Amino acid sequence: MQADKTFTNAKRLAEALCFDYERMHNVDIRIMRIFNTYGPRMLPNDGRVISNFVVQALQEKSLTVYGEGKQTRSFCFFDDLIKGMNLLMNSSHKRPIKLGNPDEYSILSIAEIIRSKINPKLKIIHQPLPSDDPNRRKPNINLAREKLDWQSKIDFSEGLDKTIAYF
C-alpha cells in the first residue's frame, strides 16, 4: 500500500509541475489520468495482467493469480483511450480528467475468461498476494462523460479477442 501512495503522490507532483509550467510560460496543457489500457501491441513481458495471462495461456502454462484473485481491475481498450485523448486535446477542459473503463472484473474472473478463450484445460494457480497489490482499480469517468461526451465503447470480450489475436 505504501508504494501505491508514493506513486499517487508522484503523479500529483507531476500534475502540479505541469500547472506551474502552464502558468509560468502561458502554454495550454491537458492532464489525463489513464487507467489500465490493453490491446494489440502490448509487450509480452510488460508485467500487466492481460498480457501475463494471454502469454501464459498461449504457452500452455498455468495462469498465475495472486491471492484469491478477488482484487478488481477495469480495462479500457486502447482504441477507446485514443478517442478520449483526442477529445480531451481538442477540448477547452483544463483540469485533470480520468480516462478508462469503469467496468470491474476480479483478477480471477479475468484469468477464467482468458483461459476459456484460449485453452479451457489450463490450470489456475494461486501465489501469495503482494502487500502492495491494490484491492480495487476503477476510474470515475463522470467528468469525461460530462465534458468530453466520452466513455469506452469496446466490449471487454471483443477487446480481448483482438488482443489474443495479436499475441
Image (cartoon, rainbow, N blue to C red):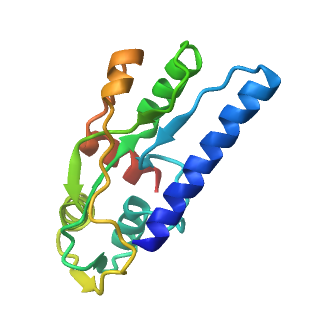
Question: Extreme right residue here?
Answer: 25
Name the spot of residue 118 as percent of width and height, x first. Answer: 27, 62
Question: Extreme bottom residue here?
Answer: 128
Above or below, comparing residue 79 to residue 150 in the picture: below
Q: Is residue 73 left or right of residue 15?
A: left
Above or below, comparing residue 18 to residue 56 in the picture: above
Q: Is residue 92 left or right of residue 104?
A: right
Name the spot of residue 144 as percent of width and height, x first. Answer: 38, 25
Please report the residue visible at 27 percent of the width from the left and 65 percent of the height from the top.
135
Name the spot of residue 26 as percent of width and height, x first. Answer: 78, 19
Please report the residue visible at 29 percent of the width from the left and 86 percent of the height from the top.
127
Say whether residue 149 is visible: no
Which of 4 and 113 lies nearest the eye of the viewer? 4
Say whether residue 88 is visible: yes
Above or below, comparing residue 121 to residue 97 in the picture: below
Name the image quarter holding residue 134: bottom left
Which of 159 and 12 lies nearest the eye of the viewer? 12
Please report the residue visible at 41 percent of the width from the left and 17 percent of the height from the top.
148
Name the image quarter holding residue 63: bottom left
Which of 149 and 10 lies nearest the eye of the viewer? 10
Q: Is residue 43 left or right of residue 97?
A: right
Name the spot of residue 146 as percent of width and height, x first. Answer: 33, 17
Q: How many marks?
A: 0
Q: Quadrant of the N terminus?
A: bottom left
